[in-house]
Amino acid sequence: MAALTAALDGLLALALAGVAVAALGGKRRFRSVILFVVFGLFLALAWARLGAVDLALAEAAIGAGVTGALLMAALDRLRRTEVGAEPPPRPRLWPAVVVSLPVAAAGTWTLLSMEPAVRPPVAAHLEASGVDHPVTAVLLAFRAWDTLLEVAVLVAAGLAVRAAGPVPRPPTTEAGPLQRGLLRLVVPVMVVLAVYLLWRGSHAPGGAFQAGALLAAAGVLIQLTHFPGPLDRTRAWQRPAGMVGLAVFTAAALGTLALTAPLAWPAAWAKVWILTIEAAAALSIGVLLTRLFTGGAPVAASGEERS
């Protein structure tokens, strides 16, 4: 069994390298985007094999799913803006290979020589964090500043895309009966799973980023099919919903500054603070990722750009 497991891990490593090379060296952009999505799924499997389930979930949902949708949308817009343009010259890959191989070797050697010095301190202070999952404790308690800045970067990206102006869209057709029936079944399930992942993050792999990615995936599905529903009636609060995560996180930092120290949650209410921040962040992540896909405009079922 050990030999079979090692063989499968070796095949997965070879598949990762092969798909990465094929994605970077492909002549067709569409093929490269598809291979990028496949690479993300293989990478999620690799993280799962390494025991990093949180990273596996994030990679599958954000790295492969939402990012793949963003790349497909960008590819479609690029095709419409490059009609009649000359194809760019094919870049040479050998300089990148020459540079990346020693860097990868040095990084691998550094990781193998490092001792797991993080796990014991986290385990020693896990009870004081208010949650039972060490990854959530690190992200929302011990290194909460990093997570706050990550949310701020995502908000800045959404504002930058919005500032770039509306994106013209090609004519599309309304969703058919089969698509409507499928969305009525799939989207509520995705929302329920997002809520479950959000709650699960306090004691097991999950959390705001995974939940937000699922919400974004549901929003992308609705946008792709122009399915009429709540998004068409709630465009007014999509902009504040994208900001609520950063606003709640910042308010929590200011509140704890008056009580104890910045982002140092009171022990008796730590879990409540963390879950409140994660719920707000998940909503913002879902809205912002969906609006990145739509070019910064609020999501409308009709597919039209709304200011």
Image: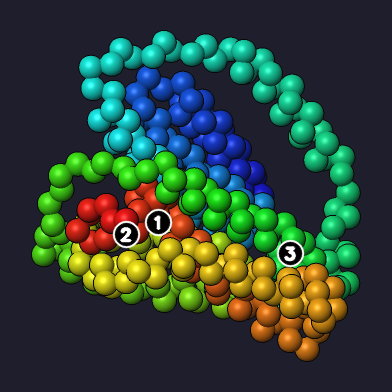
Residue 186: image quadrant is bottom left
The amino acid at mark 3 is Ala
Residue 57: image quadrant is bottom right
Distance CA(mark 3)–CA(mark 2): 30 Å
Query: Considering only order in the chain, which callout, 2 or 3, is on the residue closer to the N terminus?
Result: 3
Count of number-bearing discs: 3
Q: Is residue 79 above or below residue 280?
A: above
Residue 18, horizontal then vertical, whole percent = 51, 29
Does residue 146 appear in this view? yes
Q: Is residue 19 above or below residue 152?
A: above
What numbered label is drawn on residue 290? 1
Nearest-to-viewer mark from 3 and 2? 2
| Residue at x 56%, y 31% (from the top left corner) | 17
Q: Nearer the viewer, residue 68 or 238?
A: 238
| Residue at x 48%, y 63% (from the top left corner) | 242
Q: Do labels 1 and 2 touch, CB within 8 Å?
A: yes
Instruction: Please indicate whether residue 215 sits to the left or right of residue 97 in the image.
Output: left
Q: Do labels 3 and 2 touch, CB within 8 Å?
A: no
Mark 3 element type: helix
Residue labelled with disc 3: 144
Nearest-to-viewer mark from 1 and 2? 2
The amino acid at mark 2 is Val
Query: Considering only order in the chain, which callout, 2 or 1, is on the residue closer to the N terminus?
Result: 1
Residue 47, horizontal then vertical, whole percent = 61, 51
Mark 1 element type: helix
What numbered label is drawn on residue 299? 2
